[in-house]
Structures are given as structure tokens and as C-alpha cells.
Amino acid sequence: MILAEQIEQIRSRMEGIAKSEGRLVAELAEASKRADEKLRNEVAELAEEHMARRGAVLEELQALAGRLGAIPRQLDQLAQEERAPPKLQSHQTIPLNLSVRVCGDQRNEILDREINNHLRRRSAR
């Protein structure tokens, strides 16, 4: 075999290898696109599920707060005088019942006294 024939065979094999590798690269690119699309859809579904759970938790918290009377559903539904903190007389206290008492522990009384003092100072402004 002469050198020109050997070069032609090598070139022919190289073309075959290049075509084969080109097909592999195209298949890999397509597989990557499918994986990206699947991942994108899964992330969108997870985000949607998260928002649904978040909305359900928010509704539960609002319902609980409404039952407790702790916070209004909508602040603008209250009259201005209902939004203001209640005015406490200097002798008036609010029973808090925080249940932190341990036998021989005075933390509950101290906590009640400090909170009521704070509320009186705040209402005096």
C-alpha cells in the first residue's frame, strides 16, 4: 500500500469517528434538554405545592388568631380607637397567666409586674 492510500483510509476513519461523535454529542444535548425540562417542571410543582401549604398555614394561623382575639383579620376593619392600646390606670393590671411557675419560683410575678409596668408607661404617653 502506498502512502496516499493509507492517508485516505485514515481520513475516511476520522470522518466516520467524527460523524459518530457528532451523533453522540447531539444525543447528549437532547438528553440534557429533557433533563433540564423535567427538573424545571419538578421545581415549578414543588414551588406550587409550597405556596399551597404556605397559604393553608396562613389561613390556620389567621383562624387561630381570630379565635384568640389576638390579631384582627384586617387592620383597616377596626376603628381607630380599637387600634390604640388600652389606657391602664396606675392601679390596674392585666392578668397574663403565662404559666412559667416552678415551685418556689417568682418569675411569673416578676414577668407580670414588668409587662404591666411597660404597658402603663406606654399608655401614659
Image (cartoon, rainbow, N blue to C red):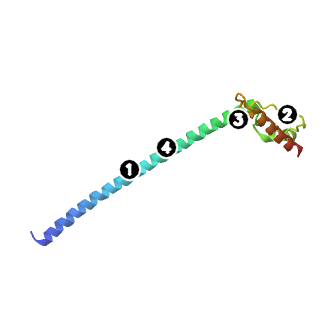
Disc 3 and disc 4 in contact, CB within 8 angstroms = no
Residue where numbered disc 4 is placed: 42
Residue where numbered disc 2 is placed: 93
Foreground disc of the pair 4, 2: 2
Distance, label 1 to label 2, CA atoms, is 70 Å
Q: What element carries label 3?
A: helix
Distance, label 1 to label 4, CA atoms, is 16 Å
Foreground disc of the pair 1, 3: 3
Residue 122 in percent (x, y) is at 85, 44
Residue where numbered disc 3 is placed: 62
Distance, label 4 to label 2, CA atoms, is 55 Å
Disc 1 and disc 3 in contact, CB within 8 angstroms = no
Image height of 92 relative to 26, above or below: above
Kind of residue sitting beneath label 1: Ala
Kind of residue sitting beneath label 4: Glu
Q: How crowded is mark 4: few (under 14 residues within 10 Å), some or many (20 or more)?
A: few
Distance, label 2 to label 3, CA atoms, is 28 Å
